[in-house]
Image (spheres, rainbow, N blue to C red):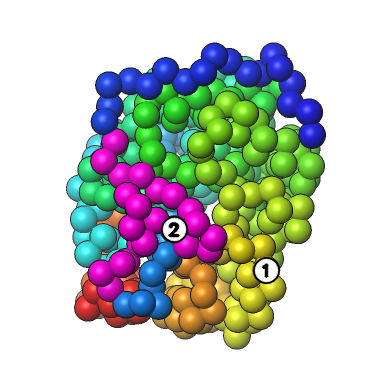
Amino acid sequence: MEILSQFLIAACSATTFVPQTKLAINGMHFYINDRLTYADYKREAHGRLMNVRMVNAVFDDENPATCPSDFNPDTNTDRFIELMNDYKAKGILAFTINLQGGMPGYEGAINSAFRSDGGLKPNYMDRVRRVIEAADARGLIIILGFFYQRQDGILQDVNAVRQATVNATTWICDQGYTNVIVEIANEYRHPGFDHQIITDEDGEVELMNLVRQTAPNLLVSTSGMGDAEFHSSLANAADFILIHGNTSDPDEYEGKVNALKHYNKPIVFNEDWCFSDDTRRIGDAVEKLTNAFEAGASWGIMNQIRNQQYPFIFEIGKPNEGENAKLDFQAYERMAKLVGIE
């Protein structure tokens, strides 16, 4: 698909930042700094990218009618960064964040790194920068989402969506980051999106191509809905396959993952809603993690209540904190055992 030249800008000009962590893909495997991920641990884990959804680690709400009075976006980001090592110790190698955040548990939030014309907000991007650079220093990867339902309407039209894509991509490239991979949209088919370019496959492919034309070395994909399926045109276009398992029975994971293996690309769950007080869950976190891992996919925890809804709790749960926290704890314990850290 032809890419409109007016949305392309000059070649990236990297800052003085010196990256320590570089992600690459070879076939179905991820490599960090030219080594298979988890190379020092269980063979079954080699090449995986186990991850956590922490989209509101860079959250802000510009709506004075809805923003909690005691919320400080910089303190929120600092709290998350301080806990990164705890997740790495349990086998986590990547975090998903998003330039338009995630549903914070209440409606009406205005949470976006983009202005209406697709320009970037410096304060928001500074929080994103801090997260990416903290991850880089720890040998960790950021799955950076660009667009989120409920928030893409901030962009005034389809050309602003294209410009936002180019601007965010250029920013990643200019910063010199090599530990970032892109998720164009969180659940691109979600009815909460306003712009059709985000909600259909041709539009997603166009936006992926905009990323590649702007920064040819940047790896890019998008994520499907909670059925753990991925459209064939996107599987062909993407560098890696992002699926969500929210509404899928874990007994289906082997078949659904196997159906995607012929694309010979990494298969990554980066959202799975599966905790006790998340009312739509099917199966629990340990079961979903285990089944996805045994099927050959990387898997990502989504603890909707704990990590994404205000007040955001970024600490790993403890068994004595309540049912949700106990299941959170159990999931990370299982994660560590599966990859061979414990």
Q: For label 2, count other residues whose C-alpha is less than 10 Å away and answer few (under 14), some (14-19) or many (20+).
A: many
The part of the image, by quadrant, that contains residue 107 is top right
Q: Which residue is mark 1?
A: 262
The N terminus, quarter of image: top right
Number of marks in the rendered image: 2
Which dot marks residue 104? none
Q: Is residue 24 left or right of residue 314?
A: right
Disc 1 secondary structure class: helix
**Residue type at the position of mark 2:** Phe
Question: What x and y, as percent, mark residue 67?
Answer: 43, 35
Question: What x and y, as percent, mark residue 138?
Answer: 23, 49
Q: Earlier in the sequence, mark 1 or mark 2?
A: 2
What residue do we see at 69% from left, 14% from top? 6
Q: Nearer the viewer, residue 337 or 17?
A: 17
Which dot marks residue 30? 2
Q: Is residue 246 left or right of residue 300?
A: right
Q: Is residue 1 left or right of residue 17?
A: right
Q: Nearer the viewer, residue 206 or 224?
A: 206
Q: CA distance from mark 1 to mark 2?
A: 17 Å
Question: What x and y, as percent, mark residue 44?
Answer: 40, 78
**Residue type at the position of mark 1:** His
96 part of magenta stretch:
no
The magenta stretch is: 19-41
What residue do we see at 76% from left, 58% from top? 232
